[in-house]
Amino acid sequence: MLQCGHCTCCCYLYYFWSWPELNEKQNICVKISWSEELIFMKVEYYVFSGTGNTLMIAREVGGRLAERGCDVSYRMIGKPEMFKIQGECVVGLAFPIAFFSSYPLVLNFIASLPQGKGRKIFMTATMAGAAMGAEGKFRSMVSDKGYVPVGSEIFQMPGNYNNKTIDAVKNKATITGALTEARSFADSLIDGTSRWNRGVPIIPSLWQWFVRSGRALRFFYGMFPIAIDNDRCIKCMRCLENCPAHAIDKNSESLFIYPDRCQSCQRCVAFCPVKAVIVPGKPAEQYRAMDFEEFIKD
Ligand SMILES: Cc1cc2nc3c(=O)[nH]c(=O)nc-3n(C[C@H](O)[C@H](O)[C@H](O)COP(=O)(O)O)c2cc1C
Ligand code: SF4
Ligand code: SF4
């Protein structure tokens, strides 16, 4: 900086004279945040989706990140050999909200992530209506592992269980809105304006423990158990091969579900081609965000 050495007046003069230039420099400084690195970096996006809502949003966020220069790889939580966190990369997490938290399978996956060592991480969850500040709990989980939480968003999508009727028009509008938000969220990651909120501490840590231990799930499963109608089943094995919890098995005549393994993710209900996976006594419309072929494509 120019200075005569007598007083600070010329410093101020210099400042006002050159402020547009400084402003520009400041902007450049803002842009050289973590997100500037993201443009040139790999994104390892870990996704769990029962009925397609979360996958749809993750593909939209990932697609936009790719458009903005990122190299995005999707890893499906629940499939073997998905741990690929190596070298320089940003980690993305995508999962549905369940019990104001997520499925034990998802919570256990997050808990089993390797140490972050300063690696950046973002979260995209989907819900039907209320998460009760769950993002704060997820923020703590990843921070405690040494990750730097750089952005989170919980997108409202159609409810995926116990639907008496499916309001296609309303669902379409909900999905269209969420997809627009997904692109904006990806832009905010790139532009460095995203935030990962600390959440509202309505749900105590005890609740998170209650969910992760499987107790909330058992309670829910008691009300909405999932069963296979073997008279209707055509033994295509789609449900058995795609259950993320290996909760579906078969014997010589029939398929059955291990209640203590099932996560109630609704995947088997959603994608059975003949509607043979049901909640006994609670007939509901089958909901899925996309067709099975779309769901399993890489
Ligand atoms: C067992 C279960 C529990 C759920 N709990 C919640 C919840 O606590 N809050 C909420 O807003 N939505 C809840 N939902 C709805 C899902 O979060 C929502 O429909 C989500 O978008 C489904 O995503 P997916 O299609 O990727 O599985 C729950 C769904 C299931 C099946
Ligand atoms: S997806 Fe449906 S038809 Fe196919 S094996 Fe499962 S229950 Fe039977
Ligand atoms: S049995 Fe069905 S609802 Fe249960 S974890 Fe497997 S796919 Fe999900």
Image (spheres, rainbow, N blue to C red):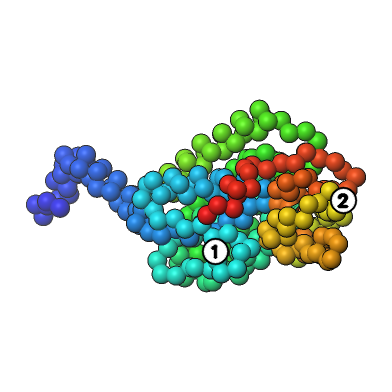
Left or right of 238? Residue 89 is left
Q: Residue 143 bears which disc, if any?
A: 1
Residue located farthest toward the top when viewing the structure as drawn: 169
Q: Residue at x 81, y 36 (%)?
A: 164
Q: Residue at x 67, y 39 (%)?
A: 158
Ligand 2 within 8 Å, label 2 CB:
no
- Front residue of this view, candidates 256 and 40: 256
- In the rendered image, residue 48, in percent from the top left (x then y), is placed at 62, 56
Q: Crowding near pointer 2: few (<14 within 10 Å), some, many (20+)?
A: few
One can see residue 290 in this view: yes
In the image, residue 181 sits, relative to residue 134, either above or below, namely: above
- For mark 2, what is the residue? 231
- In the rendered image, residue 70, in percent from the top left (x then y), is placed at 39, 53
One can see residue 224 in this view: no
Q: Amino acid at mark 2?
A: Asp
Dot 1: element: helix
Q: Residue at x 81, y 51 (%)?
A: 233
Q: Amino acid at mark 1?
A: Ser
Residue located farthest toward the right when viewing the structure as drawn: 281
Which sits earlier in the primary sequence, circle 2 or circle 1? Answer: 1
In the image, residue 8 sits, relative to residue 109, either above or below, namely: above
In the image, residue 134 sits, relative to residue 164, either above or below, namely: below
Left or right of 241? Residue 275 is right
Q: Nearer the viewer, mark 2 or mark 1?
A: 2
Q: Would you say the residues marked 2 and 1 are in contact, meaning their CB atoms lie under 8 Å apart?
A: no
Left or right of 189? Residue 7 is left
Ligand 1 within 8 Å, label 1 CB:
no
Residue located farthest toward the left when viewing the structure as drawn: 4
- In the rendered image, residue 289, in percent from the top left (x then y), is placed at 64, 42
- Front residue of this view, candidates 234 and 88: 234
- Front residue of this view, candidates 207 and 290: 290
Work out how far the residue at label 2 is from the one at label 1, CA to CA, in angstroms: 49 Å
